[in-house]
Amino acid sequence: MALKITVIGTGYLGATHAAAMAELGFEVLALDVVPEKIEKLERGEAPMYEPGLDELLRKHVAGFEDSSGRLRFTQDWAELGAFGDVHFVCVNTPQRHGEYASDMSYVDSAFASLAPHLHGPALVVGKSTVPVGTADRLAAYLAAHAPAGEDAELAWNPEFLREGFAVKDTLHPDRIVVGVRSERAEKLLREVYATPIAEGSPFVITDFPTAELVKTSANSFLATKISFINAMAEVCEAAGGDVAKLAEAIGYDDRIGKKFLRAGIGFGGGCLPKDIRAFMARAGELGADQALTFLREIDSINMRQRGQMVELARQALGGGPFLGKRVGVLGATFKPDSDDVRDSPALNVAGQIHLQGGQVTVYDPKGMDNARRVFPTLGYADSALDAVRGADIVLHLTEWREFRELDEEALGEVAAARVILDGRNALDPERWRKAGWTYRAMGRPKA
Ligand code: UDX
């Protein structure tokens, strides 16, 4: 008989995972404690902008014409416990307020709510990003609190999906990593990830701590690449070099690789910054002081980039205060193809200039609602052209395709001055300079 799957938490991770499991042919029941999220999902709408996810949901959510009907939602833990053979825990672990450590309250409360309803054999699979040691603790919790006792087993299966590519990354992962303690758990997870999802994807079986650490170290490595190239940008800036050429040249070495070497205002979002800080906090607790020092440097280079961008803007405007200066900002989300503004470097730079008296007007293709909610006092415009109208300087802070395709001549006609700072090293300097713009980017030659 086919396995039945449940998914707990329907954010980026959970909503995508639930839809992907239905796509693979499983009956799926997903739960969220926020009723509005469930209502939205039942209408076939993802809780966030994610390319392809609405379509996948409508293909499977029960109630749509021609849908497979394999994906349903509930708020009832007893129904969830009785339904599933395999329960995926996909709740988030945000940064704890005012601290570097992860807030584990959603994970803990998911386990507390689920455990009493596990009356028969079941596999609970943690997918959330957690501090190493969590799985050991939760396995003991399940054994003590599930009526099924040891038959309610735990596995750890970190998720590596990127926003903007969530559907693709879930259906065609680079690798599947599972931390297990028994053959039964391994067998069940192999069954869940049977083709097509695992076709060609390496399946790495390991223990709990390694599985937890694979996720945090992968994110830390990506963060390291970005902070490394941003450190090189600082040197290029001082020495008159070109960091974009440097990144291209070192990237041809396939031990280094081309990806994640774009210098600029650095990394943001709901994952990399908080994961590396939580990793720092955990490394400190474990007495791994050198790891802690190393990670602290990565984080501090990253945060410095935002301030550098503000300084670059100040200098380009003559070096004085921002008061009375009009600043057009292109981009608010932490990266393109997402509406996510969590810990967004773009919004942070815009906000710093605004708080220093600049008259900032922001435009973003998908992030306007979220940006307005997070930073209501900034100015907002409905198009790139309107954001730039009358601006003394233009800041390109999120590398949307729409911005690469802008007509620099038309923009120049509405701007008060043709000065653009490219915080993402993503525009073509030649094109902008040809149209009479002063183009500047971090770590690139001034002309
Ligand atoms: C990241 C990881 O990539 C993913 O594997 C993990 O599961 C979750 O965290 P995501 O948060 O979606 O995914 O963003 P990602 O595409 O990794 O970009 C992170 C940030 O780094 C963005 O702000 C991006 O603009 C920035 N970045 C990326 C750079 O500044 N330079 C680069 O070269 C690449």
Image (cartoon, rainbow, N blue to C red):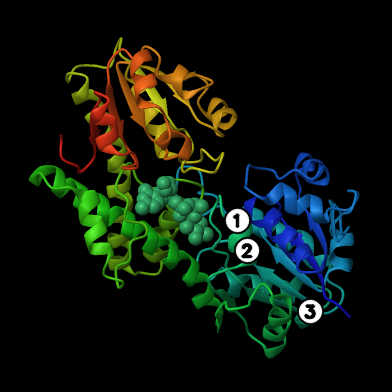
Q: Residue furthest top?
A: 324
Q: Residue at x 43, y 66 (%)?
A: 218
| Tag 2: amino acid | Thr
Q: Position of residue 176 (x, y in %)?
A: 58, 74
Circle 1 residues within 10 Å: few <14, some 14–19, many ≥20: many
| Tag 3: amino acid | Gly
Q: Position of residue 341 (x, y in %)?
A: 51, 38
Alpha carbons under labels 3 and 2: distance apart: 31 Å
Alpha carbons under labels 1 and 2: distance apart: 6 Å
The quarter of the picture where residue 207 lies is: bottom right
Q: Residue at x 28, y 62 (%)?
A: 294
Q: Quadrant of the N terminus?
A: bottom right
Residue that label 3 marks: 149
| Res. 340 mark | none
| Tag 1: amino acid | Ala
Q: Residue at x 87, y 59 (%)?
A: 68
| Viewer-side residue, 93 vs 351 | 351
Q: Secondary structure at mark 2?
A: helix
N-terminal-most mark, 1 or 3: 3
Q: Secondary structure at mark 1?
A: helix
Residue that label 2 marks: 170
Q: Position of residue 351 (x, y in %)?
A: 40, 26
